Image (cartoon, helix red, strand yellow):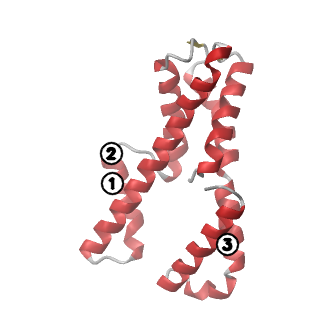
Amino acid sequence: MRIYRGKVEPAALEILDRLIKENLVEVDPAEIDEARKDLESVLLEYMRMHREINEAAKDMADKRGLDYSALGRIRRNLAKERNFGMDDEGLDYIIEQMIEIMFSSGHVDEVWGEDHVLNKAIAPILKKHMNITEEVDKEVRKQIKNLEDAEGTVSWEVEYQQKKDKLERLKKLK
């Protein structure tokens, strides 16, 4: 699960808008920008922690002389140690953090919705804004299909990352 920097503000704004329209939260109109920033902060912190865990996993794999295939296991262990939701648990983790911040925020007057109702309202919006990851991945893989047999090799990874970075810049996701 991946969130792009360019999707943080639109996702937070859409979530807050939906929660207000469905009377799940109450926010003073003068505080909407700040309440949106609270939700954005959850997404930005998730991105920071995700990046930190990925880097730590790469460093551990290098120090132990492990190959690329060990990264997933190391990442999962690091995430578990830090009580951080990654991969399939990432969406639930982010939603839980957003609900917590709304309860503690000085910019949200009242949270009327129960957790499961808030979850049901937030999840599809996050999924929509995060689905772009799969679209980018498919497009990049299509561009480097000539290297399919080499997937998992260093040359494939380098080519994939270069194409992905270029596509993300073109789509203004970074």
Name the disc covering residue 96, or none.
Answer: none
Amino acid type, mark 1: Leu
Find residue 165 and report its image quarter.
Answer: bottom right
Is 39 on the left or on the right of 65, as rendered? right
Amino acid type, mark 2: Arg
Q: Earlier in the sequence, mark 2 or mark 3?
A: 2
User: Is disc 2 placed on a helix, strand or loop?
Assistant: loop
User: Is disc 1 placed on a helix, strand or loop?
Assistant: helix
In contact (CB < 8 Å): disc 1 and disc 3: no
The x and y percentages for residue 49 are 41, 48
Tell me, yes or no, if residue 9 can be seen here.
yes
10 Å crowding of disc 3: few (<14), some (14-19), many (20+):
many
Question: Compared with residue 80, is residue 73 higher up or lower down, i.e. above or below?
Answer: below
10 Å crowding of disc 1: few (<14), some (14-19), many (20+):
some
Find residue 95 and report its image quarter.
Answer: top right
Q: Would you name the residue on which mark 2 appears?
A: 82
Amino acid type, mark 3: Val
Q: Would you name the residue on which mark 3 appears?
A: 140
In contact (CB < 8 Å): disc 2 and disc 3: no
10 Å crowding of disc 2: few (<14), some (14-19), many (20+):
few
Find residue 136 and report its image quarter.
Answer: bottom right
Q: Would you name the residue on which mark 1 appears?
A: 78
User: Disc 2 versus disc 3: distance between alpha carbons?
Assistant: 32 Å
In contact (CB < 8 Å): disc 2 and disc 1: yes
The x and y percentages for residue 111 are 57, 15
Seen at 67% across and 81% down, the residue is 144
Q: Residue furthest right?
A: 21
Seen at 58% across and 50% down, the residue is 3
Seen at 31% across and 67% down, the residue is 59
Quarter of the picture containing the C terminus is bottom right
Question: Compared with residue 115, is residue 125 higher up or lower down, i.e. above or below?
Answer: below
